[in-house]
């Protein structure tokens, strides 16, 4: 689908009253979009990747408490944490997007493709937990509440990650995966400040940010930096809705934001996209003046892990 067509659809649906808008957008995704055949593998892989980053830095995630910013449709990343030995997860979303039928689809997929799931996790998987979950699912239809309770997941939506109401030092790992690019800068600062309060001093902030133009994920005719040619006001017309808002912050902006919030960066792993770099070097489009002072490498960075500790 051409990205401008998708933009018009999202803008139209976002103008509906919230409850109607959520239902309509889900219906569209389920019948025509990415949710037609929901597969949990990519979100399980996100949890596994997060876990590996934590262990790579010498920290132990087993039997610890995770906090996730941005649940999405299914709390699959917290499920992955539990399958690898997390004590519990608290997952929070500004919008109540979670769907029971997608939870059931996910577990059904895992049951049918058990060997694939075991291979995906490898040595990190606690097999007894997976087998017990699938047995629990196969014996009876599983409700959302039963699933969450069984996997030690607390779901809060609508919820504000900048005002969690959790106790001080309540969590060990503050996480997100491809979420921070959808949050306004002022809100990100508030979320990091609140995270510093609820994360214990030996804990970590582990966040993966996708800097790419998300319209490029479904429209191969545009590059991952297509949106950098627009002014803020022009871009607002295309993606200023609840379903596609992107702050367009670049990697250097995020580093500054974290550091200004009192964070010490432990890991930064910018991924430079060669197609985007070529677009910049060949002058195929003109950058908006907002981004004109940034280096080509920064502009072409389409993702990165940001791992930090609060001072």
Image (cartoon, grey):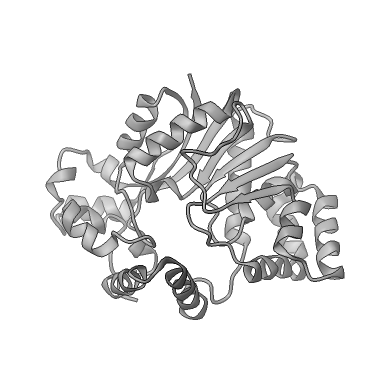
Question: Which percent across, then down, holds residue 274?
Answer: 32, 51
Residue lying at 61% horizontally and 26% vertically, measured from the top left: 169
**Quarter that holds the N terminus:** bottom left
Comparing 60 with 28, the one in front is: 28
Quarter of image, res 168: top right
Q: Is residue 170 left or right of residue 124?
A: left
In percent of the image, x 30 and y 36: which residue is there?
253
Is 104 on the left-hand or right-hand side of 29? right
On the image, the x and y values in percent for residue 286 come to 13, 54
Whether residue 295 is visible to the viewer of this picture, yes or no, is yes
Q: Residue furthest bottom?
A: 31
Q: At 14% across and 50% down in the image, what residue appears?
A: 288
Instruction: Tell me the residue at 60%/60% (across/down).
Output: 74
Tell me if residue 150 comes above or below residue 26 in the rendering: above
Is residue 268 visible in the rendered image? The answer is no
204 w.r.t. 298: above or below: above
Q: Is residue 156 above or below residue 41?
A: above
In the displayed structure, 198 sits above or below 90; it is: above
From the viewer's side, name the closer residue of 18 and 114: 18
Residue 78 in the image: x percent, y percent? Answer: 65, 49
Left or right: residue 11 versus residue 110 is left
Extreme residue in the top direction: 311
Residue 50 in picture, x, y percent from top left = 58, 42
């Amino acid at each position: 689908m051409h990205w401008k067509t998708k933009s018009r659809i999202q803008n139209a649906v976002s103008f509906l009253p919230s409850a109607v808008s959520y239902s309509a957008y889900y219906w569209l995704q389920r019948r025509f979009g990415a949710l037609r055949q929901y597969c949990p593998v990519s979100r399980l892989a996100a949890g596994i990747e997060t876990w590996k980053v934590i262990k790579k830095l010498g920290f132990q995630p087993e039997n610890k408490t995770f906090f996730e910013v941005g649940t999405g449709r299914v709390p699959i990343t917290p499920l992955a944490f539990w399958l690898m030995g997390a004590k519990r997860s608290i997952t929070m979303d500004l919008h109540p997007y979670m769907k029971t039928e997608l939870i059931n689809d996910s577990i059904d997929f895992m049951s049918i493709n058990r060997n694939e799931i075991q291979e995906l996790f490898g040595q990190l998987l606690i097999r007894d937990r997976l087998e017990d979950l699938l047995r629990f699912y196969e014996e009876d239809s599983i409700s959302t509440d039963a699933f969450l309770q069984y996997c030690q997941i607390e779901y809060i939506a609508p919820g504000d990650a900048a005002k969690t109401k959790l106790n001080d030092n309540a969590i060990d790992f503050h996480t997100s995966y491809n979420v921070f690019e959808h949050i306004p800068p002022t809100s990100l600062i508030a979320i990091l400040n609140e995270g510093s309060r609820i994360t214990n001093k030996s804990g970590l902030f582990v966040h993966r940010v996708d800097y790419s133009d998300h319209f490029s994920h479904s429209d191969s005719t545009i590059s991952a930096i297509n949106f950098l040619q627009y002014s803020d006001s022009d871009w607002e017309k295309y993606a200023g809705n609840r379903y596609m808002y992107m702050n367009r912050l670049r990697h250097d902006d995020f580093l500054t934001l974290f550091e200004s919030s009192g964070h010490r960066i432990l890991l930064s792993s910018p991924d430079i996209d060669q197609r985007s770099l070529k677009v910049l070097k060949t002058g195929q489009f003109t950058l908006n003046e907002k981004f004109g002072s940034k280096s080509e490498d920064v502009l072409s960075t389409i993702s990165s892990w940001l791992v930090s500790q609060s001072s």
